[in-house]
């Protein structure tokens, strides 16, 4: 089989490389000539573990190619995947579908024979129908069907997620299109991957409902963590205690500074707007969006409080700026709220991230970017962990103390154990876990 993938961003590049690994002849298309040239040279424009080797392997095998020429890629394809960006529109939060619709119109011009046009991008309910209308308007003679095949890729684990997914969702009203899609995913039948076949609208809704539910779990445990701090409970034990309930599950119950990234912020907001447009408001999701936004902004206050109520003239070391480990993605990362707030409060910020600094430099002016975690810690009055990269999990605490002016750590990812940090001589703050100071405060309230 042959496919074309329109868009070589995160979803398009990972999906194209993985389909080629399945043995599908894949051509990835992008208007950015510089990006295509880099990909042809073997340079991967995003950070994703294992992707460089996967791309190189399949390019060498002749199954994966890159081009700016959509006229070359589309006519030979059995299926064309639209994997362009759908960012939030400024001002109203609706998904910007201009790139999707432009791609549909251009695809229509070069269709040859029966083709399945597949929306891989995350799109609101009704987008697939509109794509079909655009194609019919542009090419009334075209023989095609539209399908929705949402992605469920976690940044940092995307290849494994594609190769060993929890499920594959295929939304289409056409038996012929369904057969083409099942043929593309045939390698997954060997590992008995569930294939969920639905209507277009249902598949589109599944993607938003899944991301919104996960964002809700994160926000729920963050609010429980805040309450745990007040009453002297340990949020990790709470999360374990409820997560062992099969109806709840253990995943996405780790407290922190709030969710970020390319999906949850824009998808929760887009679903809120869809509910409002159709007169069916989603009050829970609206609250999730509001609570998460306020939480990220409030994290800087925790750092200021740990420094005695003021960071003016002080140096704060920040470890991790990407929204999660194993990615360089800075979209809606908590660091974009925390660092400017610290700077506005008068702090000097020294920061280090294993992958995100190149992108972060464009977004966070005035930060001193360092070559290592220990470089960032030099002469710092306090350190905060914003992203739980593995290399931050086993810092030499003796060396950390020697480098810093004061042993103050604000661990917003709960990487370390409070008792261990206290024994190491640190003033340690974390999220949702009791410290001696906190327990003393609770005891006063109770007595």
Image: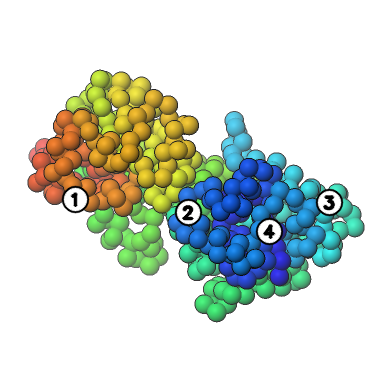
Q: Quadrant of residue 440?
A: top left
Residue drawn at 13 percent across, 44 percent down: 398
The spot of residue 71 in percent (x, y) is: 79, 52
Q: Residues within 10 Å of mark 2 (few under 14, many from 20)?
A: many
336, 70: nearer the viewer: 70
Q: CA distance from mark 1 to mark 3?
A: 60 Å
Q: Mark 2 or mark 3: which is in front?
A: 2
The answer to which of marks 3 and 4 sits earlier in the sequence is 4
Disc 4 and disc 2: Cα gap in Å?
20 Å
Residue that label 1 marks: 417
Residue that numbered label 2 is attached to: 48
Near-viewer residue (379 or 140)? 379
Mark 4 and mark 2 residues within 8 Å of each other at the beta carbon:
no
In the rendered structure, the answer to whether residue 311 lies left or right of residue 250 reads left
Q: Residue at x 83, y 51 (%)?
A: 109
Above or below, 185 against 294 in this view is: below
Residue 394 x %, y %:
23, 51
The structure's colour scheme is rainbow
The answer to whether marks 2 and 3 mark residues whose Cβ atoms lie closer than 8 Å is no
Numbered tag placed on residue 58 in the rendering: none
Q: Is residue 427 left or right of residue 351?
A: left
The image quadrant of residue 16 is: bottom right
Q: Residue 109's mark? A: 3
Residue underneath mark 4: 27
Question: Tag 1 or tag 4, which sits nearer the N-term?
Answer: 4
Circle 1 or circle 3, nearest the eye: 3
Question: Percent x, y for residue 446?
Answer: 13, 41
């Amino acid at each position: 089989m042959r496919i074309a993938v329109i868009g070589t961003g995160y979803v398009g590049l990972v999906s194209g490389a993985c389909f080629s690994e399945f043995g599908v002849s894949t051509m990835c298309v992008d208007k950015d000539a510089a990006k295509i040239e880099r990909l042809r040279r073997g340079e991967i424009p995003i950070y994703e573990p294992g992707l460089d080797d996967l791309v190189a392997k399949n390019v060498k095998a002749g199954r994966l190619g890159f081009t700016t020429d959509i006229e070359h890629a589309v006519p030979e394809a059995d299926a064309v995947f639209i994997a362009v960006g759908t960012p939030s529109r400024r001002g109203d939060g609706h998904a910007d579908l201009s790139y999707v619709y432009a791609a549909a119109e251009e695809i229509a011009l070069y269709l040859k024979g029966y083709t399945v046009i597949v929306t891989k991008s995350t799109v609101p309910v009704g987008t697939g129908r509109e794509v079909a209308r655009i194609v019919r308007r542009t090419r009334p003679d075209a023989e095609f069907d539209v399908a929705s095949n949402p992605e469920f890729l976690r940044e940092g684990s995307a290849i494994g997620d594609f190769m060993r997914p929890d499920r594959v969702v295929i939304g289409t009203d056409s038996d012929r299109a369904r057969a083409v899609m099942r043929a593309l995913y045939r390698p997954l039948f060997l590992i008995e991957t569930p294939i969920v076949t639905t209507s277009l609208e249902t598949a589109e809704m599944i993607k938003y409902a899944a991301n919104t539910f996960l964002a809700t779990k994160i926000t729920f445990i963050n609010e429980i963590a805040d309450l745990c701090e007040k009453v002297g409970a340990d949020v990790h034990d709470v999360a374990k205690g409820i997560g062992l309930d099969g109806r709840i599950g253990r995943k996405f119950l780790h407290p922190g500074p709030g969710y970020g990234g390319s999906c949850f912020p824009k998808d929760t907001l887009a679903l809120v707007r869809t509910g409002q447009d159709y007169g069916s408001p989603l009050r829970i999701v609206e609250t999730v969006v509001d609570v998460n936004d306020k939480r990220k902004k409030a994290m800087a206050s925790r750092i200021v409080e740990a420094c005695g109520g003021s960071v003016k003239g002080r140096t704060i070391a920040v470890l991790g700026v990407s929204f999660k480990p194993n990615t360089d993605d800075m979209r809606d990362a908590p660091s974009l709220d925390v660092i400017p707030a610290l700077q506005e409060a008068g702090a000097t910020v020294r920061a280090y991230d294993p992958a995100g600094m190149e992108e972060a430099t464009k977004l966070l002016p005035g930060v001193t970017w360092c070559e290592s975690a220990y470089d960032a810690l030099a002469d710092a009055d306090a350190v905060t962990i914003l992203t739980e990269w593995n290399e931050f999990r086993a810092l030499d605490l003796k060396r950390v103390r020697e480098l810093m002016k004061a042993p103050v750590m604000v661990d917003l990812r709960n990487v370390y154990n409070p008792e261990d940090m206290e024994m190491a001589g640190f003033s340690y703050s974390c999220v949702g876990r009791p410290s001696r100071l906190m327990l003393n405060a609770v005891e006063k309230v109770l007595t």
